[in-house]
Amino acid sequence: MATEQVKKINSKIPEGPVAEKWTNYKAHQRLVNPKNKLKLDVIVVGTGLAGASAAASLGEMGFNVLNFCIQDSPRRAHSIAAQGGINAAKNYQNDGDSVYRLFYDTVKGGDYRAREANVYRLAEVSNNIIDQCVAQGVPFAREYGGMLANRSFGGAQVSRTFYAKGQTGQQLLLGAYSSLSAQVQAGKVKLFTRYEMEDVVIVDGRARGIIAKNLVTGKLERFSANAVVIATGGYGNAYFLSTNAMGCNCTAAVQCYRKGAYMANPSYVQIHPTCIPVHGDKQSKLTLMSESLRNDGRIWVPKKLEDAKKLQEGTLQGWEIPEEDRDYYLERRYPAFGNLVPRDVASRAAKERCDKGFGVNNTGLAVFLDFSESINRLGLDAMKQRYGNLFDMYEEITDVYPGDLANEINGVKYYKPMMIYPAIHYTMGGVWVDYELQTSIPGLFAIGECNFSDHGANRLGASALMQGLADGYFVLPYTIQNYLADQAIWPRISTDLPEFAEAEKAVDAELSRLLNIKGKRSVDSIHKELGHIMWEYVGMGRTAEGLKTGIQKMKELQKEFDTNLFVPGSKEGLNVELDKAIHLRDFFTMGELVAHDALSRNESCGGHFREEYQTEEGEAKRDDANYFYVGCWEYQGADKDPELIKEPLEYEAIKVQTRNYKN
Ligand SMILES: Cc1cc2nc3c(=O)[nH]c(=O)nc-3n(C[C@H](O)[C@H](O)[C@H](O)COP(=O)(O)OP(=O)(O)OC[C@H]3O[C@@H](n4cnc5c(N)ncnc54)[C@H](O)[C@@H]3O)c2cc1C
């Protein structure tokens, strides 16, 4: 079983009140001598919002940046999938928002498991992000008078989400990409598309480069630099079915973990309440219906079990059920926040209704998201303006258009509702980083979704883009200089060093091992089975017994992977199956880490729900006396359980209390 130790990990948080820490930090840091910047190389792996913004900013500051991604263009990073928006504390609506309030909402939304100082910094720089993106020409939605428009997201009672229809991630990424392209043109950023980082190279205890596979030729190549930044996204695809893009993987992060970077809070996985329900076992992808829809859509199930049964049998339709027989259960249970409770709360509430038999589709695993009231009040055109592409996407997938008038009962018009159910969406856990976003390996930094930083046990909607861009545009470019200041005098590291040769040899051996198993099962079939185990035992409701079973089952399946996998083709040239096999190898490591962390945390908080630890009303029951820490896992070897190191949390500005969204 995993062992535990309590450590005060050096997170380099400056002294002073929370509101002054970042200002103090910037004032005191040792900036690299501007003349030396030109000699310093930085590898940035990833071109999502975090990676592209970091690479562009570092290039603009004078560093030589080598920027890698697995797609054929930086613009195809998973970040383009982001629909709903990005938070900032601009208070354009004059509804009482402030940096403090965004900070407070984020800490509370994360169920008091985030590092306080980091979150304050995030809230502080949030406003700069909007200015930066507007300057780049990002077409945020605007009010009639020209002001930037806002909408509301879960866990907040103010309207602070900036958006570009339902395509915010894409527009933000185009903005970041234009800045990146300017640096490519200026010769400060060199792009390596269709390259996959397979390993980080450590020389004398510091990250000095990477081994990357050219995905087109299949060749392994060595790259050295003064520092390495990974911005490689989350590990949601360990569950096989998720809202993440098919290419999302955790190979870079897991390889860094194997080389000594701690993995923090892996059990904090976000299950998003508004996804299109699973409709068969041939599916490889789940589709998100943005949380922004909860601004105008009301979530309900029937009040009567017999109505639910008829819905499941297909003999009754949602629009035939009158108002008085509908249970708007979020509005009933959480009157203060209603449909805009945080995602973990909304997901569990949906599961609770479905577990009790009130599910509304043929599998009994769905609830309605209904726009009838908003369409009746504001008109269909207003809804189309706000969510047009989401309505179209829903129709393309389900053949139902949510704006179609379907019935009229007692003078009330009812439109066809969407059906939704929770699905794996985002990972709050990730590579451990200190206040400077440096991992436990000197010279290795992690930003964006792949680090654990700011969201505690549950991320609020529209805060991932905020964090990714805060890290990339405003935090890392400052903090990395503190590390690089000492590095300016180092000569370029040669890729002929034995450390590079060994790392490359090990990657090559791994590729050969996978190709030579020559078993009978495809990568996808094993991945799907892993996903079932993860969802069943490490999913929305966890128990100690179930987690132990899950770990056991994962170990057995891993044996199957190691002995009965079939990867066609060879190492040369394009081999997508081989790349997927590498990813799956690392999803196994990550899956077990998620389960170990969940098993060690005998409490419920945010996205981590242990069924043994809940209140009488079914809410998460935290145990601050014993679990008020960041759980950092240290790799001990392939056949050994990882070791838990605890970074105690310290709060000075916010009183830690039980989350309340009722009043
Ligand atoms: C459907 C959907 C909708 C969402 N909507 C919102 C929203 O409205 N608001 C919000 O705030 N958040 C939203 N999110 C979350 C948000 O989109 C992500 O958290 C965020 O975009 C992650 O950005 P990133 O830069 O950290 O990583 P990613 O965008 O995942 O980029 C990862 C990058 O790393 C590269 N990479 C990965 N592995 C390797 C490797 N081994 N070698 C080389 N390169 C590698 C990839 O090529 C890619 O360039 C949404 C998520 C989903 C799934």
Image: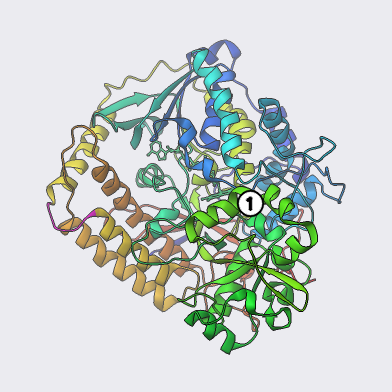
Crowd class of label 1 (few under 14; some 14 to 19; many from 20; radius 10 Å): many
Percent position of residue 125, x then y? 71, 37
Q: Is residue 482 above or below residue 327?
A: above
Residue at (61%, 71%) from the top-left corner?
A: 623
Q: Is residue 248 above or below residue 394?
A: above
**As rendered, which of 372 and 65 lies closer to the eye?**
372
Residue at 61%, 35% (x, y): give it: 172
Judged left or right of residue 662, residue 439 is: left
Q: How many marks?
A: 1
Q: Which residue is mark 1?
A: 115
Q: Quadrant of the N terminus?
A: bottom left
- In percent of width and height, residue 427 lies at 51, 54
Position of residue 540 in the picture relative to residue 371 (left or right): left
Q: Is residue 538 visible?
A: yes
Please state which amino acid type lies under the numbered disc 1: Arg
Q: How was the colour assigned to the protein in this rendering?
A: rainbow
Q: Which corner quadrant of the image does residue 270 belong to?
A: bottom right
Residue 278 placement: quadrant: bottom left
Q: Quadrant of the C terminus?
A: bottom right
**Region rendered in magenta:** 518-522
Q: Residue at the spot x=21%, y=62% of the render?
A: 559
Q: Give x and y (percent) for residue 480.
A: 56, 29
Q: Check if residue 401 falls in the magenta segment.
A: no
